[in-house]
């Protein structure tokens, strides 16, 4: 059997990284929607008083994204697969984009 024909199985590290990344990404998306959807729908900043609370709640999922990034790098070093590469890239993008999106409403926002 050719060595390229053997597909490396997902390591437990990669499975944990995917789980943490999906939960953290969902939590960040929920926090973003609580913060910015009312602003985008109504055009007023009435929900912006929630900003300190949303910021405090976002620290745990953002930390989860950073943990998923580290676990993704570890999984990628053990077995370089498309899944491990996707976790690393997604975690890196989300770890940079999440604070910006929560602070400014994201790049897809028309809020000034």
Image: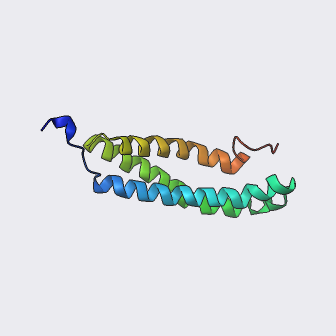
Percent position (x, y) of residue 17? 39, 54
Percent position (x, y) of residue 67? 43, 53
Task: Please report the residue visible at 54 percent of the width from the left and 46 percent of the height from the top.
Answer: 94
Picture mark count: 0
Colour mode of the rendering: rainbow
Residue 76: quarter of image: top left
Residue 97: quarter of image: top right
24 left or right of 5 in image: right
Task: Please report the residue visible at 66 percent of the width from the left and 47 percent of the height from the top.
Answer: 101
Residue 35: quarter of image: bottom right
Nearest the eye: 48 or 111: 111
82 left or right of 90 in image: left
Q: Quadrant of the N terminus?
A: top left
Nearest the eye: 70 or 81: 81
Nearest the eye: 60 or 35: 35
Q: Quadrant of the C terminus?
A: top right
Report the residue that reaches farthest toward the left. Answer: 1
Task: Please report the residue visible at 59 percent of the width from the left and 56 percent of the height from the top.
Answer: 28
């Amino acid at each position: 059997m050719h060595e390229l024909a053997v597909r490396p199985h997902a390591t437990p590290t990669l499975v944990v990284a995917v789980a943490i990344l999906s939960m953290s990404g969902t939590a960040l998306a929920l926090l973003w929607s609580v913060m910015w959807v009312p602003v985008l729908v109504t055009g007023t900043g009435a929900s912006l008083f929630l900003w300190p609370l949303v910021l405090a709640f976002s620290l745990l999922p953002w930390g989860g994204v950073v943990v998923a990034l580290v676990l993704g790098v570890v999984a990628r070093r053990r077995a370089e697969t498309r899944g491990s590469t996707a976790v690393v890239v997604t975690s890196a993008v989300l770890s940079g984009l999440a604070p910006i999106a929560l602070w400014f409403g994201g790049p897809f926002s028309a809020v000034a």
